[in-house]
Amino acid sequence: MDVLNQITQEFKLREDHVKNIVELLDEGNTIPFIARYRKEMTGHIDDQVLRELSDRLTYLRNIEKRKEEVSKSITEQGKMTDEIAASLTAAETLAEVEDIYRPYKQKRKTRATVAIAKGLEPLADIIYAQNITEGTVEDIAKPFVNEELGVANAKEAISGAQDIIAERISDEAELRKKLRKIYLKNGEISSKIQKAEEDGAKTYEMYADYSEPVSEIKSHRILALNRGEEEGYLKVRVAIDEEFAVRVCEVGIVKEGSVTTACVKAAVADAYKRLIQPSIEREIRNYLTENAQEQAIKMFDVNLRPLLMQPPVKDKVTMGFDPAYRTGCKIAVVDGTGKVLDTTVVYPTPPQSKTAEAKAALEKLINKYSVDVISIGNGTASKESEIFVADMLKDYGGKVGYVVVNEAGASVYSGSPLAAKEFPQYDLTLRSAISIARRLQDPLAELIKIDPKAIGVGQYQHDMPPARLDEVLDGVLEDCVNSVGVDLNTASPSLLSRVSGLNSGIANNIIAYREENGKFTTRKQLLKVPKLGAKAYEQCAGFLRIRDGKNILDNTAVHPESYEATEKLLALFGYTDKDVEERKLSSLPGQIKKYGEAKAAEECGMGVPTMNDIVVELLKPGRDVRDSLPKQELRSDVMDINDLVVGMELTGTVRNVIDFGAFIDIGVHQDGLVHISEISDNYVKHPSDVLKVGQVVKVRVLSVDVKKNRIGLTMRKPRKNS
């Protein structure tokens, strides 16, 4: 297989672009660096496509490596033929490669290997040939009776020969490939309930007597079936019509008219039932599971990305409010930069319900520090806390608002060594309140400190392959951090370690250098940081920002390698660095267009894509890409599930997107579900095609079940009465 050609065709890219991308990856360049600073070489491909391409490249190279191993093994056995070599070359999946290798793989003791040891392989050859039309099978088998080898009679000889034939049939690569396709197209997956009397079985009631075509089952149902089976509540099967499957196996093998035909038919049936069917079923289950896991992991990616990229609430004094009952609500006030100003604990919730004292304490903090916004965690006692805060803020006439934030992972962070190092003077609970405040101010900087699996997006995270999930989520973190950029003089080690080309060791070295030598004033100083060499500098420099540094370009995404070209561009149109600082370049894009983009880029020694990126940065040095996204809405009132009425129109925020819909926060503590069928009046293939985490949407109440605490929502237009 020509890997480069295969990727070129699959991704519908130019061959030279694919070649360049592969070379860049092999040279150790990171995805963010390639996506941002090598656009001329890649055809302007974004980071997500680059990651998909990189994954596919790894898979195809693994196939080629396995082909080499299989070819070497078969050759060493002296069994390589032109036909086998051609089949290996044509194989497109690891499953196909393993099918080809199956007959030559060293087997553990099987019924066939036992029969071969008894000298019954020649008999198997005679029976399999099916060219004897006279006499009986017993007559053919008699010469192979050998009590010393354990063959007592003709019946045992025939049985052993059939075992050999059955294994041969099972090892047929083309037959397995054909059956695999049939299972995927016509197979049915079914489940039966086990241990129905146990309480846990109720979780899987819908799968008690369930069946669905393999070709139609959705990923989340595969994962639910797997979990039910793992917990012992379900028995799951994948099958096709057995008679049909056996007939498929007989094609090209069974020859009518021979006295051995019946034996071969029996061997075929045995091969399918005993060897092929269980093996293919495992393969199909694995295939479905792997696809379902990839889909679930993709949903983590889809949900995590917009959550991390939520617009920061900048320069606002924020009060973090971590709700609780018995132990009290933990409070932390932080300034616009996230520095902790004050902390306390109040008890407005049951069982103490000291609302008056709590109100007095918080109003004192609000007035003392001019608090702009309160960030309330959405965990235990969140509803009661929100009611208390909304009532308290009525006295401020809308000058102070509040936001309910997803506090998932706050407790994980507060108990981590990182939190202990950041805030050694505060206990676990107060650290959590600080995190809740900061994740409103800068979601990316705060959430980056938490294991993505603890952030509360996606489904079935504990059922995912840990290494693969970590790989994908780490990629999301890396892409988000680098697309925003990092302040070199204020960033935490967690944030720095996600920058292209850096790791935790170098990040700590940067912090140590900063503490010892003071703030960085130029990007070039990075080269003085221990273990940060030329390659790491190349990868990271463009993503690190220096505010108020010696060079205004150090506060942009312009890479140092392009500084000279940038100066030429400015000079070409009569501008200086001071014009950049004072933001006097509004007419530059028009001037370049009139002059000719290609001509300007060539004269300055760079490509057009790079030049266009540089112009965007020059127009707004220090810009934050998140600022252009919709801001979070501040609240001043609160609702209860009992206030909801079917048909009521509300504004909500998307909290989680899943395969069958999305959960929307409408301000009543319990998120409502918009089923995929209620997202739009038009066909929706997948909820993520329409909705993103953090998106503000208009919804109508479709149903309310107070007892089960369930809310059904719709985004479709109201239907007219017929």
Image (cartoon, rainbow, N blue to C red):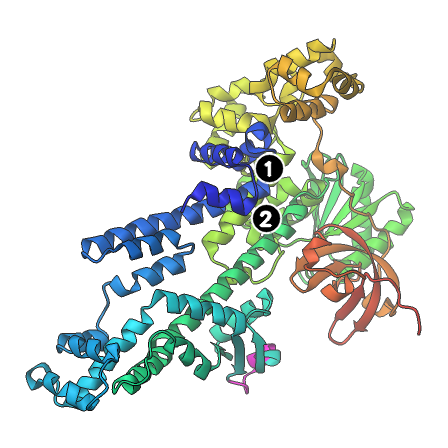
Q: Dot 1, how many residues are within 10 Å of its Cα: few (below 14), some (14-19), or many (20+)? A: some
Is residue 370 placed above or below 713 in the rendered structure?
A: above
Please say whether residue 127 is visible from this viewpoint: yes
Answer with mark 1 or mark 2, whichever residue precedes in sequence: 1
Residue that label 2 marks: 427
* Residue displayed at 38% across by 51% down: 63
Mark 1 vs mark 2, CA separation in Å? 46 Å
Q: Which residues are magenta?
A: 195-204
Is residue 170 placed above or below 261 in the rendered structure?
A: above
In percent of width and height, residue 552 lies at 67, 17
State the SS at label 2. loop
Quarter where residue 40 is shown: top right
Drawn side of residue 530 relative to residue 453, left or right: left
In percent of width and height, residue 47 lies at 58, 39
Amino acid type at image mark 2:
Asp
In percent of width and height, residue 476 lies at 58, 45
Task: Please state which of the two labelled residues, at mark 1 or mark 2, is closer to the viewer.
Answer: 1
In percent of width and height, residue 582 lies at 77, 16
Q: Give the camera-side residue of 465 and 5.
A: 5
Check the picture and name the quadrant holding the C terminus: bottom right
Q: Find out whether the residues at labels 1 and 2 contact each other: C-beta distance under 8 Å.
A: no
Residue that label 1 marks: 45
Q: Is residue 239 magenta?
A: no
* Residue displayed at 6% across by 83% down: 148
State the SS at label 1. loop
Drawn side of residue 454 relative to residue 612, left or right: left
The dominant secondary structure in magenta is helix
Amino acid type at image mark 1:
Ile
Q: Is residue 203 magenta?
A: yes
Q: Give the camera-side residue of 307 and 155.
A: 155
